[in-house]
Image (cartoon, rainbow, N blue to C red):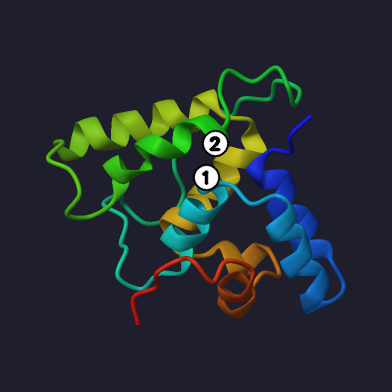
Amino acid sequence: MKLLISEVIKKASNAKTKTEKIQILKENNSQALRSILKWNYDPNINSDLPEGEVPFTRNDAPIGTEHTVLEREYRNLWRFIKGANTLSRMKREQLFIQLLEGLHETEADIICLVKDGLLQSKFRITHAVVKEAFPEIQWSE
């Protein structure tokens, strides 16, 4: 069974060496993982959502029984990026909460960190590790 994005990030974060972290990211390479990491680390990608804690009901369904997964939902993340959508603020925030409530709580936590560019505050994965794991990602400097 394919790992959830949250499981990949946790596994890479827990790896002892930079080489192991890069290897784990490469082994679990997906468009969804790259998109989420790019959103977090690219300085030119800014969230169009309020910073901080998001008021949503956590989905505590066991892994594998959640309604949806980031691997499928990443295609809709553009809706939450500044300049990429024309949604009203209320509609955008409503869609974000619906997304979070449909995901396993560990994946919802990842997206909440990523929206504020704070993934590295909880997980030991640096921008340098991500750049080395995925040299094909175009980064804004």
Residue 76, above or below 126: above
**Does the CB distance between marks 1 and 2 fall below 8 Å?**
yes
Please tell me whether mark 1 sits on a helix, a strand or a loop. Answer: helix
Q: Classify residue 75 by image quadrant.
A: top left
Q: Is residue 119 left or right of residue 76?
A: right
Q: Is residue 56 visible?
A: no
Q: For this rendering, which residue is in front, 128 or 124?
A: 128
Picture coordinates of residue 51, whole percent (x, y)? 37, 57
Amino acid type, residue under disc 2 in the picture: Leu
Q: Residues within 10 Å of mark 2 (few under 14, many from 20)?
A: many
Q: Is residue 120 left or right of residue 10?
A: left
Q: For this rendering, which residue is in front, 39 or 122?
A: 39
- Residue under label 2, please give it: 70
Picture coordinates of residue 19, whole percent (x, y)? 80, 75
Q: Is residue 36 left or right of residue 22?
A: left
Picture coordinates of residue 50, whole percent (x, y)? 31, 52
Q: CA distance from mark 1 to mark 2?
A: 7 Å
Residue plotted at (12% across, 40% down): 86
Picture coordinates of residue 38, whole percent (x, y)? 45, 62
N-term mark: 1 or 2: 1
Q: Is residue 63 left or right of residue 138?
A: right
- Residue under label 1, please give it: 32
Amino acid type, residue under disc 1 in the picture: Ala
Please tell me whether mark 2 sits on a helix, a strand or a loop. Answer: helix
Residue plotted at (74% across, 38% down): 3
Q: Residues within 10 Å of mark 1 (few under 14, many from 20)?
A: some
Residue plotted at (77% across, 64% down): 23
Residue plotted at (49% across, 49% down): 112
